Every structure is written in structure tokens, then in C-alpha cells.
Image: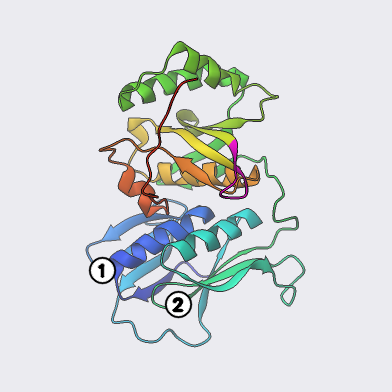
Amino acid sequence: MLDHVSLGVSSLERSRRFYDAALAPLGIVRLADFDERGSDYGVGSAPLGVEFTITREAVGRPASGMHLCFRAADRQSVIAFHNVATRCGGTCDGEPGIRPVYHPDYFAAFVLDPDGHRIEAVCHATGSAHASRAADFVAVSHGHGIRIRRAIALDADTVTRLALAFHAEDGHPLSDVGVRALVLMLEGGFTDGLVLLLEVDGTVSGYGVLSFGYGIEHGGRETFLEDIYVDPRSRGLGFGGLFINELEKRAREAGCKAIHLEVMPQNRAEHWYRRLGWSDRGSQLLTKAI
């Protein structure tokens, strides 16, 4: 049984950007950087959670027949891996799909990283590529237990408290109308969006809001990431990356073709979003109450 795998790369910063984005849909995050020599990735906390390492080397031609395969929880994650990786410096080397030569449910995608290394994501589970998945996200990160779940009506007070804190910090206080609209999303029959909660060691430490709509440019349903907030005491530990990955996954499971996010000027998180594959279209969002 392997403990971890190390891969040589020619440009550390370029490969960090690529793997930060490409591995996020698989729940794998960057755990640590060591000087200017490399970075560790995994789903737990460093050093015991490290599963994959990149190091700066004088890289030649990738070894013939060698590739790295990462396991995905579901087929949507394989598709997301391929989409993000090919947007962030990778080259398609095999579209997402069933590879029956291995077994009937072998659902995989392949990309070449910026140095030409062959990288794969695979899901072995039975089911449609668009099957819904209501299970909570559970992981261990930096020694903390992480759970991401959908908020329900009983969470109304907690969601309201987090939303008021976020909007106050953001400089745009949430009105009573906004609070009522947010609480309405927690009702069982609500289908125009959803609210997720981030729990750290059993304590709710963040929330995220997706509002669904329809757009012709992307050919169907799309979503707006209205809010994403992590309590200041839980920041800087990689929880935000796990959280936004789960929000994107839930959007895909809801049939959304694109996800949009409004970033205010001088928002320090903008570079973080870009690192995860978000891009600026060069347009402006204009709003008018009607």
C-alpha cells in the first residue's frame, strides 16, 4: 500500500495553480508548502494526511506508461475534474466516460498536466453521471472533522446569525426582507436554490447560498453563488476550498451549467477564486430593484 506519491514539475507556481484547481473537485487540497521546493496535497492534515506531493525538478520527458490516478466520490466529480483541469493549464487526454475495458462502472477522465504528466480521476460507483447525491460531505482536514450539509428550517436562527455577520463584515448589511428570503430557502419544498452549512468539529462555522436561474448562453439552468462565509476562527485552514467545492458539486447535481459570483472591489478573496478556476469576463453586473 502506498503512503504518498511525488511528482517532479518544472514550474512550481504554474503547477500549484493547476493542481489547486484540478484536485479541488476531488476534495483534495494543498496542505503545506516547503520553501520553494514543493507542495503537499491531501484530504487530511499535514503531515499524516499527505497523499500527493509536487517538487520542482529539471523535468524532462514524462516517463512512458506512467500516470497518476485519483479516486473520485462520484461521477460528477470526475466531470468537474476534467472541466477545471482543462481550463487551468491542462490538456484533454480522454473525455469523461465509461471505460468498460476495465469494468462496467469504471467512469474516468484523463488530462495532461502542464508538464505533460498523465493524470486521471476515476469513480467506480454504479449510477448515472447525473444522479443526485444527497449525502453529507464528511472529511478530516488539518486534524478537524468537517461536515457539509444542507440547511433545514430548524437551522433558521443559525443561518440568520451567520448571514448578518457576513453582510456586516462585507459592508452591505442584510435587510429584514433579505433575512426573510433567506429563511424561506430552508423550507422543505423550496426548489429555487439551497443553503449549505459548514460544520467544524460539530460547530456550524460557515454557510453558503446558491440561487438557481435559467440562462441561454450556457444552455440551461445556472446558479448564482450569493453568499459564502467562513467564521474568522476557521479561516486559513483550507476549509473554504472544501466548502466551495461542495457548493459547486451541489450546483452540478441540480443540473446547472454555470455558476456565477459577484466579487466586490478590493475583495482580498478574488485571487483565491481565480486560483480555483473562476474567471473575469470583463463585464459589469448592473442591478435595478423592480
What amino acid type should be assigned to the residue bearing mark 1? Arg
| CA distance for labels 1 and 2 | 19 Å
- Hey, which quadrant is residue 270 in on the image? top left
| In this view, 272 is above or below 63 | above
How far from the left and from the top, in percent, is residue 278? 42, 50
| In this view, 66 is above or below 166 | below
Magenta residues span: 213-221
Pointers 1 and 2 in contact (C-beta within 8 Å) = no
Q: Is 260 inside the magenta-drawn segment?
A: no
Q: How did the renderer colour the structure?
A: rainbow
Residue at the location (53% across, 85% down)? 65
Residue sticking out furthest to the top = 176
Q: Is 215 inside the magenta-drawn segment?
A: yes
For label 2, the residue is: 117
* Disc on the earlier residue, 1 or 2: 1
How far from the left and from the top, in percent, is residue 184? 59, 19
| In this view, 60 is above or below 55 | below
Mark nearer the viewer, 1 or 2: 2
What amino acid type should be assigned to the residue bearing mark 2? His
Q: How crowded is mark 2: few (under 14 residues within 10 Å), some or many (20 or more)?
A: many
For label 1, the residue is: 37
